[in-house]
Amino acid sequence: MRFGREAFFAMNTGEVCLDKNENPFDLPPSPREEIRDLLSTITLNRYPEPEYRSLREALAGYVNVDASQLIVGNGGDEILFLCFLAFVKPGDVVLRLHPSFSQYSHLIRVFGAREKTVPVELDSRQGMFRIDEEALLDAVAASSPKLVLLDSPNNPTGFSMGPEFLARLARLSPCPVVLDEAYIEFGGQSVLDIFKKEGFPRHVLVLRTLSKAWGLAGIRLGYSVSGEKICKALNDVRGPFNVNVLTQEIAKILLHYREWMESRVYSIRYMRDRFVESMARIPGWEAFPSDGNFVLLRTTAEERFARSLFERAGIRVKFLSDLPWEGTWLRITVGREEDMRAVLDECSQACVGGEEEHSLSTSALA
Ligand code: PMP
């Protein structure tokens, strides 16, 4: 086998999965034992308690807000779906950044809404992404949106917006604003601290998930933190039993292991930053600093060639063909050390061996 025993293999395929921004670390033995005990005692013939009181208390303890401010969902995806159900009708304008989380444009299509986008800007000289804050505020005011979706850290660029700016935007917005903090444990600053001090603007909802930092993508649990009005609007459209009992109980167990989560997050951030530094030494490739558990890469290699490179190596990554900037773009989830070493190996081999053979040129990135 090419990579270490610990490498992050896809189930049954032997591939290294770096395409979905999952956490590469599985659960340690102690909560696993608790889950085993849980399975032998849990009541499964009853529906979940529809208010999710104890789960919301546990999550509220983690984010340090009142449990009444939380709504839980089958992943952050369901919370987004509920926002569309509650606030968007066919033909309405929904505002998002471009690029942003792919589910946003999917939901905009499914609900027959009209999309308005504000471009994320690439500062090629500084090698970083940013947003024109005034242009975003203007777009919120001028396009009469019914919903605004802002992911910060942004997927896939990894750049974050400042919490003061986001809080200002949320206060000015005439419609509900989702501030999507799915990756906040990995970097950037949460807006929650501001809202906890100054109160929640009536239109804002902060979206979180246990899929990323907590490494629980498989149990599907997302939650939102908001004021009373948004909570009521989401509860009005939410199915009564939208989070199953197993998910609830497993989440409650894991939320006791905060130190474990934080140490894994620390390792991932460390690995991410070393990876970006190492990529900077490989000609023909550019890696952008990120606040998420993923890194956006650009190469001058043709997409076809870059794809075959990773396929051959058994590494799954996400290619992004709709980005507005020159070059071939791919997003790589930060995995374990051996995974990232394998990615670096592939990129350097492509650059050393492939210039003529694979039309890999470095001039466009200079
Ligand atoms: N927001 C963003 C920005 C994401 O990238 C994702 C998942 N990739 C989600 C929300 C939803 O995550 P989940 O449904 O796993 O909670």
Image (cartoon, rainbow, N blue to C red):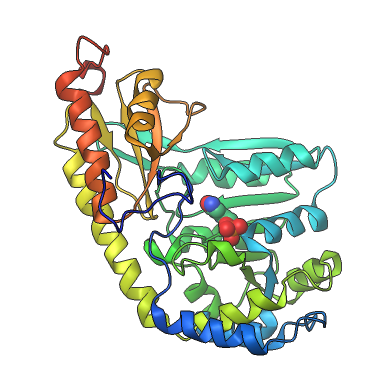
Which quadrant holds residue 327? top left
Identity of the residue drawn at 81% across and 58% down: 86
Identity of the residue drawn at 59% across and 41% down: 102
Which quadrant holds residue 343? top left
Q: Say left or right for 215 vs 60.
A: left
For the N terminus, which image quadrant?
top left
Identity of the residue drawn at 72% across and 73% down: 244
Above or below residue 88? Residue 358 is above
Which percent across, then down, holds residue 274?
20, 52
Which percent across, then down, holds residue 294?
38, 49
Which of the two residues, 327 or 86, is positioned nearer the viewer here? 327
For the C terminus, which image quadrant?
top left
Above or below residue 155? Residue 37 is below
Which percent across, then down, holds residue 134?
50, 44
Image quarter where ligand 1 lies: bottom right
Which percent across, then down, holds residue 127?
27, 37
Q: How many callouts does the rendering have?
A: 0
For residue 154, say whether it is visible.
Answer: yes
Q: Say left or right for 52 vs 66.
A: right
Q: Say left or right for 69 vs 86.
A: left
Identity of the residue drawn at 46% across and 60% down: 183
Which of the two residues, 214 or 349, is positioned nearer the viewer here? 349
Above or below residue 25? Residue 56 is below
Above or below residue 201? Residue 13 is above
For residue 179, say whether it is visible.
Answer: no
Which quadrant holds residue 168? bottom right
